[in-house]
Amino acid sequence: MLSRSYTNLLDLASGNFPVMSRVGRARLPRVMTVPGIVSELDDDQAYSVSSDVPSSIVQDRIIIVANQLPVKAKRRPDNKGWSFSWDEDSLLLQLKDGLPEEMEVIYIGSLRVDVDVNEQDDVSQTLLERFKCVPAFLPPDILAKFYHGFCKQQLWPLFHYMLPFSADHGGRFDRSLWEAYVSANKFFAQKVIEVINPEDDYVWIHDYHLMVLPTFLRRRFNRLRMGFFLHSPFPSSEIYRTLPVREEILKALLNSDLIGFHTFDYARHFLSCCSRMLGLEYQSKRGYIGLEYYGRTVGIKIMPVGIHMGQIESVLHHADKEWRVGELRQQFEGKVVLLGVDDMDIFKGINLKLLAMEQMLKQHPKWQGRAVLVQIVNPARGRGRDIEDIETEIRASCNRINEVFGQPGYEPVVFIDQPVSISDRIAFYTIAECVVVTAVRDGMNLTPYEYVVCRQGISGSESGSDASGPKKSMLVVSEFIGCSPSLSGAIRVNPWNVEATAEAMNEAISMADPEKQLRHEKHYRYVSTHDVAYWSRSFLQDMERTCKDHFRRRCWGIGLSFGFRVVALDPNFRKLNIDTIVSAYERAKNRVILLDYDGTLMPKTSINKTPGLEVLSILNTLCGDSKNVVFIVSGRGRESLSKWFSPCEKLGIAAEHGYFLRWTRDQEWETCGQSTDFGWIQIAEPVTKQYTEATDGSSIEIKESALVWHHQDADPGFGSCQAKELLDHLESVLANEPVAVKSGQYIVEVKPQGVSKGLVAEKILSSIRENGRQSDFVLCVGDDRSDEDMFEGISAMARDALPSTSVFACTVGQKPSKAKYYLDDAGDVVTMLHSLAEASDQSTSPQTDNSP
């Protein structure tokens, strides 16, 4: 079965689109074999997904792709083969609780163990049959460079705000590591392709290890429904911009349909990078944030992940029967326990926490002999000199604090640097008065969530903080971790400020019990309702909503390498065929031709905007045909247009978006606006000048009927912000004036009400009809937003008043448009007009006046 995602193969064969790569080898019969192109089916409309069709009917399978599978593997005791089991601690396994029961889940990822090449096929078969898991066995050389190289030496430090100032911190950018990262992502893509049914499956990709995977999958299946969730922080644009492959990663992520982040800060940083590096602006509609990207709307999801309530409650039930909680209570009897649970990582701020503990004991001697910090450290996931240095520093601090403040039978710091079982960890949570998290940067960190649930305990059990009284807990958390915004009752700290953190720890354990109880209740309500199932269910719903119209759009895959993107357009949108339009032109008796200038007849990149002899000659030939009415419809002023087109005697000109209009060179200008009073300029100009002076790179353009503020040369973020402020300011001061204030691409424009290219196009067509001539051929060509009004206007008029008219609304460039046709560039437009002029040349019609 072939995917209904497609490009137009006829257009592709005729050379209108670049071919991305060679035809690949088919892995499964149902998968299309051309990367980037999937064939069009004739019955596409019959299978199109309507937005009002329930998602459960459309979809029953999801493919979850991550660096590691949620499976534990170990050698059998006889060393013959492997035994496998689910990893109950894996988020990927836990998120299944939020998915529909009938939905099949397939996992793709790597194993944590090395499997001999000779065993890989058997292991793959076993995992697929028993666990619906597809393992990706990366070659050892690629794996080392991919994970320990690019992921851990480049992305992990940078995403946690560590710039590679020296070889000791992050390391210089190594192109070979990036190539290994790309190769690994491509390998994962091949595994997805082996099992995917692109028409029906969702794909959910997880974390920074696989950020370019969306491009490989999108190249293969243009309309695949695909989401991505980043579990690490996303840095500010100032940090991210230092990455040499910054645009490649951004563009790859934008090939997803939905991109998820834990916090608004991370999403805001991502959106800022898209704005500054790719010129994309986001919009919020009905509470959903979306980025318009070549006709596709890429959704931005902000939802912190939660914990698995069932797993923790199950262990709590089990822990009730164990002696561990009682043993710990006996061990720390008469003591106030503060708890830290962290990975051995340079970003967890463990030593800052120890320094804060030391400071608290100095500043508040009452806690000496009473307060104990239990610091559990999980083994490091990465490796390198940084890890060794921080471990040495942590041990030195522990030893120093215990030497200075220790007493017989009392150690102020209990350091546990070995793996701790989940039941042991929950036992420590149960007896701790406060949990302290001082990470200097962390994606989410679920330790506080787990602690709150453990302090609540199980109803009727002995495992809570106080078996007979109300539950209470306290949190001291860094403001730089992802869970911080959702824990409004926690004491938030800047971990770099050791003194303030020490005071926060003192406040947490000194606070009155009623206040602790209120904070605990607030946190428990949130944590228990926003669990991992809630998170995954919400993400899937948003992915369904974002992808609901996929099969109603026509998709083109264009671009090479990481410049690849999919252009999603109306199914009827296609390239203007010159033979077709010439044929219609020759049959027509009364024709109207409306042409934009900048970007249509003249390339936008041209510095000299004066029309060339070829353009003038073509226009004169078209105007010389008695069947034609030809107009230049432009936003430019009438003075420059009159000068440039003075050789064209019969050419009509609509200047300043149609405010001024004349039918031929020798006729007088008409005014099409509702008002001829421009006193409002005296109000608007001083306001606009203030913003120009305050915004470096901006400028004012004053036309006869309009005022335009340009900010394309300003700082993207600041210019956009100032444009919004100026729009609001001008709307306020001009509220009683007969003008419209609008924003466009890098502009804010004030112009008289009732002026647009759409209205002037309708006026021209109406005047011709009133003069007794029924237009049976209308050609309208433009390239920007103002021309969309023209396309919409003539299409509506043709539909209502001129039903038998051949209408050719044509935009310049492949992009979302109200036009039905497109041409690639200004050169194509001139070529098309030249063909029409040649058709007119063959006619012997005498020249007549074009005016109605």
Image (cartoon, grey):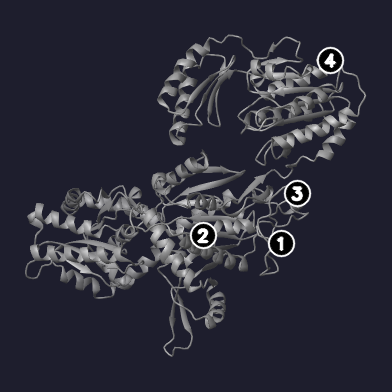
Quadrant showing the C terminus: top right
Where's residue 124, x and y in %? 55, 77
Side of 843 relative to 665 (left or right): right
N-terminal of the pair, mark 1 or mark 4, is 1
Q: Amino acid at mark 3?
A: Asp
Cα separation, mark 4 vs mark 3, equals: 40 Å
N-terminal of the pair, mark 1 or mark 2, is 1
Residue at image point 57% right, 49% down: 545
Residue designated by label 3: 11
Label 2 crowding class (10 Å Cα cut-off): few <14, some 14-19, many 20+? Answer: many
Residue designated by label 1: 2
Residue designated by label 2: 205
Residue at image point 47% right, 26% down: 698
Label 1 crowding class (10 Å Cα cut-off): few <14, some 14-19, many 20+? Answer: some
Task: Residue 385: tell me if it is visible.
Answer: yes
Element marked by disc 1: loop
Q: Amino acid at mark 4?
A: Asp
N-terminal of the pair, mark 4 or mark 3, is 3
Residue at image point 84% right, 39% down: 580
Q: Amino acid at mark 2?
A: Ile
Where's residue 750, x and y in %? 55, 20
- Which label number is shown at residue 849? 4
* Residue furthest to the bottom: 78
